Every structure is written in C-alpha cells, then in structure tokens.
Image (cartoon, rainbow, N blue to C red):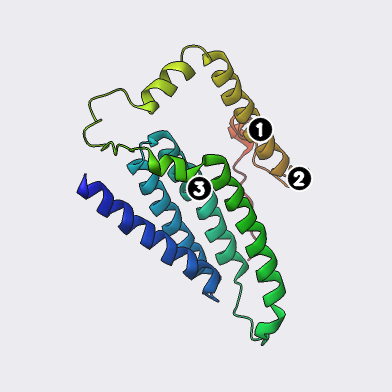
Amino acid sequence: MQLDIYLFIIFSIFALCASIMVISLSNAVHSVLFLILVFCNIASLLLLLGAEFLSFMLLIVYVGAIAVLFLFVVMMLNIKRSFIQRSFSSVIPIGLTIFFILFNQLAGIFNNLNLFNLIQKKLIWVSWISESNNITNIQVIGNVLYTKYCFLFILSGLILLVAMIGAIVLTMHQRTNVRRQKIELQLNRNFGGSVKFITLRK
C-alpha cells in the first residue's frame, strides 16, 4: 500500500511541474514535449486508480495521435520566438478570469461529492497490485464491445476506411497533359521496322 501512495505522489508532482513548464516555456516544441510528459503522468495516475482503459486510451489517443500531430505541426510551421515584450499587468485580468472560472467549477464538484462526509467515513485503500488476478475493466469493455456491439464496431471501422479512401482520392490530382509510357503499345509494335539503316554522306 505504501508503494502505491509513493507512486501517486511522485506522478502527481511530475504532472504538476510538467504542466507549469507547458505554459511557461517560450519554445513551442519544448511545450509540446512537456505536454506529452503531462499525458504520460496522468495515464500513470489513472492506472494507479484502477482505470486501465482510460489510461491506455489517453496514451493511444492523446500521446500517440494528438500530441504527435501538434509536434509535427509546430515543427513544420517553424514558429520562432517572439521578441515582443508584454507587460505583466496586461495578462493579469485574463489570468484572474480563467482562475475564478476554474475555481468555481472545482468548488461545485467538491460540493457535489461531499468530500467531508467521505473523509469522516473510513475509506479503504485498495491496492491495484492485489487486484491483478481479478477481471479488469478492459476485459469487461472488450467483452461487451466485441460481442454485443460488434456490428457497430465494424461499421465504424468501415466508415473510417471510406473516409481515408475519400481523403486520398481528393488529394490526388490527375493531370491529362502528361505524356505517359504505354506498355501495351510498345509490346504490340512491329519489331521489323523498329531498326532503320540509313546511309550517311561522306
């Protein structure tokens, strides 16, 4: 149990420090790399809390697709550092507005959870290492997804395949004024008249 608590604290500190680095760095590529680190730490926290499916989906979708897409877009755009000096007082109103909005959202969540009542009750910490022999939520979701909703799963894959083919067809530009080699005409030609002897004047 102590190992899980120590890992939870370590991953939380790393996620907090990496998220601060995302918004504080001026280089966009470094910010995206720290954003990937934030996603990895959050996935580790979800894995410690027992939400394996959400953890792996976070790694596959956000780290494997969205963050890598951000990284390639930033590298292709070649965004350089802005040398415009901004005063700290011009950023304070926007920062305070976002802070109060997020604070109200978190306060509403804690009021709905009745956190003090949960603390008064004796909470039992369940280690995920001891639950390794039980059926995980990934197995339950896979059992439901590939049996009851298998038709919808195959249909969504077919829609994605059609969308991919459509994107490829739309991006291919067929030009009609390009001279191409026609193999069938070259194979059907008469080889007797292909070589011609001419006499050169001396």
Residue 134 in percent (x, y) is at 27, 24
Which of disc 3 and disc 1 is earlier in sequence?
Answer: 3
The disc at residue 62 is: 3
**Residue 178 falls left or right of residue 46:** right
Q: Nearer the viewer, residue 113 or 15?
A: 113
Q: Residue at x 71, y 73 (%)?
A: 93
Which corner quadrant holds the C terminus? bottom right
Give the CA separation, mark 1 to mark 3.
Answer: 21 Å
The location of residue 144, given as percent across then percent down, is 46, 17
The quarter of the picture where residue 111 lies is top right
The residue indicated by pointer 1 is: 163
| Above/below status of 134 relative to 1 | above
- Spatial CA span between label 2 and label 3: 38 Å
* Of the pair 144 and 82, the residue shown nearer to us: 144
- Name the amino acid type tagged 1: Ala
Q: Image check: 161 left or right of 45?
A: right
Amino acid type of the residue that numbered disc 2 sits on in the rendered structure: Arg
Residue positioned 60% across, 29% down in the render: 161
Q: Secondary structure at mark 3?
A: helix
Position of the N terminus, as image quadrant, is top left
